[in-house]
Image (cartoon, helix red, strand yellow):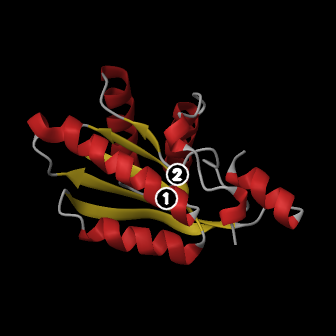
Amino acid sequence: MNISDAAVRKFGRAMPTFRLIYASRSVIAPEQAEGVIEAIVDVSRIRNRNVGVTGCLILAGGRFAQVLEGEQHRVEDIMASICRDVRHTDIGILEQKMVPQRRFSAWSLGYAGPSSFVKNAIVAQLARNLRGSPRSIEALLRMMDAFCAEPVPPDASPAKASDLP
């Protein structure tokens, strides 16, 4: 069950949610990247699941992009923590707004790491997103949707329905 399903079951309809999208530049040494990113993803999945936040993280060409969805104060708390993280810099908020429903409701943190295809597609999209146009943000979200269409790994599942407010 994903968070949207749980909200419908609990409240009778999908609840609006706060979405924040940012991009940043990684300062992780390439030879350390795999282990460091794996640790970030592991910790983030647990934290996000515990507070009912969902989303997707991508890394390519030394750039991160992430979508966070959930209660506004929880997303903002996580973003404050992200802003204090010294493993990246040049953090730019691409979008923050209320949306009718979660886009990544089945993922406490979907993650797409380095690969030639992913890298080329993401780097090109992030270059367009740095201009912040609504069309480029929507294209980035569609790319993340395609990634998250894969089966959900057991350790990436979101909070239980009983954990929702």
Give coordinates of residue 126: x percent, y percent: 36, 44
Helix, strand or loop at mark 2: strand
Task: Assess disc 1: are there few (<14), some (14-19) or many (≥20) residues with their C-alpha within 10 Å of its C-alpha.
Answer: many
The amino acid pointed to by label 2 is Gly
Instruction: Give the residue at the far bottom of this rendering.
Output: 73
Q: Please tell me the numbered disc located at residue 144.
A: none
Give coordinates of residue 14: x percent, y percent: 80, 60
Task: Assess disc 2: are there few (<14), some (14-19) or many (≥20) residues with their C-alpha within 10 Å of its C-alpha.
Answer: many
Residue 47's quadrant in the figure? bottom left
Image quarter in which the C terminus is found: bottom right
Q: Nearer the viewer, mark 1 or mark 2?
A: 1
Instruction: Give the residue at the far top of this rendering.
Output: 116
Asked whether the viewer can see residue 151, the reply is yes
The residue drawn where x is 28% and y is 55% is 24
Q: Is residue 5 left or right of residue 36?
A: right
Helix, strand or loop at mark 1: helix
The residue drawn where x is 36% and y is 46% is 41
The amino acid pointed to by label 1 is Asn
Image quarter in which the N terminus is found: top right
The residue drawn where x is 56% and y is 45% is 107
Which residue is the site of mark 1?
48
Q: Is residue 73 above or below residue 1?
A: below
Q: Is residue 68 left or right of residue 116?
A: right
Instruction: Give the residue at the far right of this rendering.
Output: 12
Which comes before the other along the chain, label 1 or label 2?
Answer: 1
**Measured Cα–Cα span from mark 1 to mark 2:** 9 Å
Give coordinates of residue 89: x percent, y percent: 20, 61
Which residue is the site of mark 2?
55
Give coordinates of residue 131: x percent, y percent: 38, 55
Look at the numbered discs 1 and 2 and tell me whether their residues touch, using CB distance below 8 Å.
yes
